Image: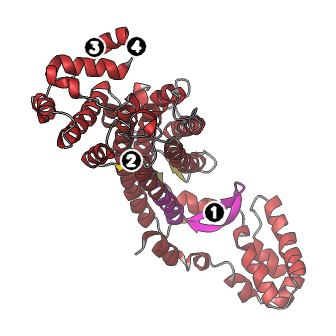
Amino acid sequence: MVPRYARPEMSAIWEPENRFRIWFEIEAHATEALADLGVVPKSAAKALWDWWATNPAIDVPAIDAIEAVTKHDVIAFLTWVAEQVGDEARFMHQGMTSSDVLDTCLAVQLTQAADLLLADLDKLLEAIKRRAYEHKMTPTIGRSHGIHAEPVTFGLKMAEAYAEFARCKARLVAARADIATCAISGAVGTFANIDPRVEEHVAAKLGLAIEPVSTQVIPRDRHAMFFATLGVVASSIERLAVEVRHLQRTEVLEAEEYFSPGQKGSSAMPHKRNPVLTENLTGLARMVRSYALPAMENVALWHERDISHSSVERFIGPDATITLDFALGRITGVIDKLLVYPERMMKNLDKMGGLVHSQRVLLALTQAGVSREDAYRMVQRNAMKVWESDGQLSLMELLKADPDVAAALSAQEIEDKFNLDYHYKNVDTIFARVFGE
């Protein structure tokens, strides 16, 4: 992973030391269960745990040196442990296969990563909620196709983001549960040489569920769903980041990323304040999404197993989780420190001479007995004059001067349709739906 986009706690999950420690715990718990079943001496399990209790340092270079000869990572690890523990270590790995260790370890690492990502989402949700209530009734213009539509509030924009990331959290909770399975079933998954109770014991110790049918490997549809879920979370990050980028454009400038003292926006133009954080988030989201496809392609393994998935997962496991962890931290910082400009929002909302109230007039005309087709035509012909004047003309005044409109609506009735507060009468209802308060 690129260190620039990595944070220490998530990166540590994928360090060799953590992987080897998980491997040891899998082997030791399995040996413990085998001892309880009378398959191996109880002294074997005790020897492993006694050595482990001394908090030994994992000698990664030594294990790598053994692997350089054996060309097999699990055998290299077992050989190194045996060198440390002594004769009793020969009872490790009884009836097990490498995938029992590798797949169960990956499940532990992905659940560890999911827990950090869920904590990240909680922090993001907290920041979004705070900004939503802060700007619950801050008027701004809603846009469709990038064009002024009707008034909303900035708080509603934040509430929308909160609801989206709440869904992301629910999906990740489900994906975590789906990936958290243990397989200790031996060659081709038949339990021929190891009792299923060993798997149950290891799963319980590691906080995992048992894999119903592991076929020597844990089915990769679980992993595909996990990485697809990370891709969806990344897409939601990008959606919010793109919103900030659009709002920061000079012609809009309704909100912008915090610009710290001493920060420089351009090597050539001293005036620049660029949305570099949210632009970066778009790039990071592309990377996280790109890991979902190879995870899906890993589903189709040959028969009971092959290792075509292995090299893929050595990339996407660390890269997807580390990148998403960084991205969630970054978007949280953006929202937490986002500079919001209510005055500019109101200025933009008023920019087009009241065009944003056109629908209310249209509906009022139909209520007054005018056909929808005629009502649309009346309002549009006046609205186009305002549009072509770049908002210099007033839609309200043009409508009051239009004899066809005036025949159906009084001047006061027309003016009533330009009340901004009308658009915000259900904000409380929406907030109650989103925040449950």
Question: What kind of residue is marked 2?
Answer: Ala
Q: Is residue 219 above or below residue 49?
A: below
Q: Earlier in the sequence, mark 2 or mark 1?
A: 1
Q: Position of residue 61 (x, y in %)?
A: 27, 13
Which residue is located at x 45 percent, y 42 percent? 214
Q: Return the residue at label 1.
A: 142
Q: Does residue 73 appear to the left or right of 233 in the view shown?
A: left
Q: Which quadrant of the structure image shows residue 378? A: bottom right
Q: CA distance from mark 1 to mark 4?
A: 60 Å
Which residue is located at x 49 percent, y 25 percent? 311
Q: Return the residue at label 4.
A: 71
Q: Nearer the viewer, residue 406 or 14?
A: 14
Q: Position of residue 41 (x, y in %)?
A: 15, 33
**How many residues crowd mark 1 within 10 Å: few (<14), some (14–19), many (20+)?**
some
Which secondary structure lies at badge 1?
strand
Q: Return the residue at label 3.
A: 61
Closer to us: mark 2 or mark 1?
2
Q: Which mark is residue 180?
A: 2
Q: CA distance from mark 2 to mark 1?
A: 42 Å
Closer to us: mark 3 or mark 1?
3
Q: CA distance from mark 2 to mark 3?
A: 30 Å
Bounds of the magenta segment? 140-168
Circle 2/circle 1 CB separation < 8 Å? no
Q: Earlier in the sequence, mark 4 or mark 3?
A: 3
**Magenta highlight on residue 147:** yes
Which secondary structure lies at badge 4?
loop
Which residue is located at x 49 percent, y 74 percent? 433
Question: What kind of residue is marked 3?
Answer: Pro
Which residue is located at x 45 percent, y 55 percent? 174
Q: Does residue 149 appear to the left or right of 234 in the view shown?
A: right
Q: Earlier in the sequence, mark 2 or mark 3?
A: 3
